Structure formats: structure tokens, C-alpha cells
Image (spheres, rainbow, N blue to C red):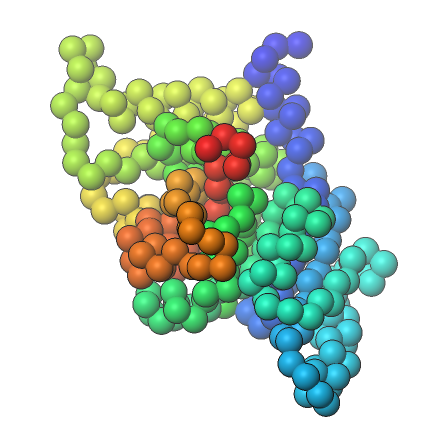
Amino acid sequence: MGVGHRLAEAARSTVFRNLLIADSGKGHVEEMVRTLRAIPPCRQAKVNLLHVVTEQGGEGFRSHRDKADSLVAEAVVRMGLEPAEVNAIVREGDTKQTVLKVADELDADLIVMGSRGLGRLQSILANSTSQYVFQLSTRPMLLVRDDLYVRAINRVLVTVDGTGVGDDAIRLACELVSAIPGGTLTGVHVTRQDLAPSRGGRSPADEVLEKAVQRARGYGVAMKPIHRTGDIGRTVCDTAEEIKADLVVIASQDRRPLVAKALVDLDRLLGSSVSDFIRVHAPAPVLLVREPEGRR
């Protein structure tokens, strides 16, 4: 068995198996779960549905807790699943910290969360929960804005940057596309300006994209390469719009807070993060891939 064949088999067998759905009962998260589970290798994925009851005392808390079970039951119905197929979890505490804690307890390989469709600064501030979780978790995270129409996944766009975490993003994109009949994968590499070609007439961007194409081919996927220049976040979003992407997979090397996990990385929240721009403006759900802790 050749290396390419082994990689392709691995891609088909290792698509997400353990999903953590952190759902507030609003938006399109349940639709996204149904869409994922329509992909053959994801049909057997374990679904863990988390509802967090904010800490509060007295009758208010008991009333909220009493409603939690019915909210979870309604979410299960919206996902088109039987109650026995879902591990329903109700926890009390801070939502941000609880999502992180439960993801670690379950060893979830994908966190799915909703995200509000607002203006950029408004969205960043209002979405502190999803942004906080992304900042602090090394697990892949799928963000679904509530102003998007969730479509069946056929056209996938992945960012290409030539890094280790970029290779992880390509692998995950290939895992999904290889399981979708007729699915297509486009890889976009964005540079802020055109770089002069080498003596052989090939630019650094050409080399990065060629390696990415070869890597995707090893997983049994033909990736269409695109090189664009300009602002990275805006150009990725424009490319997603152009190819009518149903899912955008991005590698993020945004640094996480170094002082304490209780603090949000405010400089990233307020606009210097490419991944955050894409999260807010992409015309499709965004799958964010972070570098594993052990590789740092």
C-alpha cells in the first residue's frame, strides 16, 4: 500500500468522532450538526450537547435549572436525533470556563458554537464566549454565525500558509472533502504583496501552494490552488464569496494569553487578529484550527 493511499484511508477514518455542541438554543448550530452528520464518516460521531446555567442563587437559579432539561430536549429534536444518541450535559457556572472544562473532560475533537452576526466590533464584544474559548483551546472549533444560511457542505475553502498548523488545516479539510461525493477543495494563499520569482521563475507563493497541493493529493483530494495579494482576512472572505464556499477552514497562529487563562487577549479581540476578522465576515461557517499545545 502506497503512502498516498494510506493517507487517504486515514483521512476517511479520522473525521470528527466526538463533538461538543455548546448551544444557547439560538442561531443555526443544530443545523450545522445535521449538516456534519450527513457526511458518512461523521454519522457515528458521538454528540455531546452542553447547556450552561449561569451561576445565580435562590429561586432564579432553580427556575433556570428546571428549564435546562427542556431546552436540551428541544435542541435534540432540532438536530434530528434520538435522545439516546445524545449525551446531554447541564452544568452550572461561567459559560466560557465551563465549555473549556467540559471539552477537556470529554477530549472533544471538535467544539461547535454559535456566533452573532453583528458589526465587527459589536460582534467581537458580544461574542466574548466563543472568542474566549477559541483563544484558550487548542481544539478545532466550528463557529456558526446566526445570520448565515447553513448549506450542505460541498465546496470547502482552506487557507494555506506553509506552517505546521496550516498543514493541520489542510488535513482536516481533506478529511471532510474526501468523504463528500462531488466535494471540492480550494486552497488560498494570501500574501500582502507579490514577491519576485526566483531564478527558476517560481515565486515563494508557488512553492507553498505546490507543497499544499501535494499534501492534499496524499489524502486523495485534488485541491485547486489560488494565490491572491492584499489584506489577508478580507481576501480570504472575498475568495470564499467568489467560490461560494459552504465551509471555510483556517489555520490560526494567534497567540493565546500568557498571563492567565482568566484574561482575554484584548489586543486580538479589538482587531489585530486575521482569524477574528474571518470569523466575523466570512460568508460561511468557519472551522478554526489551532496549533496543539505540545508543538509550541
Q: Nearer the viewer, residue 266 or 90?
A: 266
Task: Answer yes or no: is residue 94 visible.
Answer: yes
Residue farthest front in this picture: 259
Residue lying at the far right of the rendered structure: 84
Residue at image x 35%, y 37%? 188
User: Which quadrant is the N terminus positioned in?
Assistant: top right
With 218 as the anchor, is 211 left or right in this view? left
Residue visible at 47% across and 22% down?
A: 215
Image position of 183 with respect to 281: above or below: above
Tell whether 208 sits left or right of 132. Answer: left
Q: Position of residue 138 (x, y in %)?
A: 53, 43
Q: Nearer the viewer, residue 245 or 7?
A: 7
**Which quarter of the figure has residue 23?**
bottom right
Q: Locate residue 48, reporting x and y percent.
A: 72, 56
- Seen in the picture, residue 118 relative to 270 is either above or below; the reply is below
Q: Residue at x 22, y 17 (%)?
A: 202
- Classify residue 92 as left or right of residue 4: right
**Which quadrant would residue 60 be assigned to in this image?**
bottom right
Residue at 81% x, 55% y: name it. 85
Residue 137 % position (x, y): 53, 48
Is there any visible trace of residue 33 in the rendered image? no
Apparent side of residue 257 relative to residue 84 in the rendered image (left or right): left
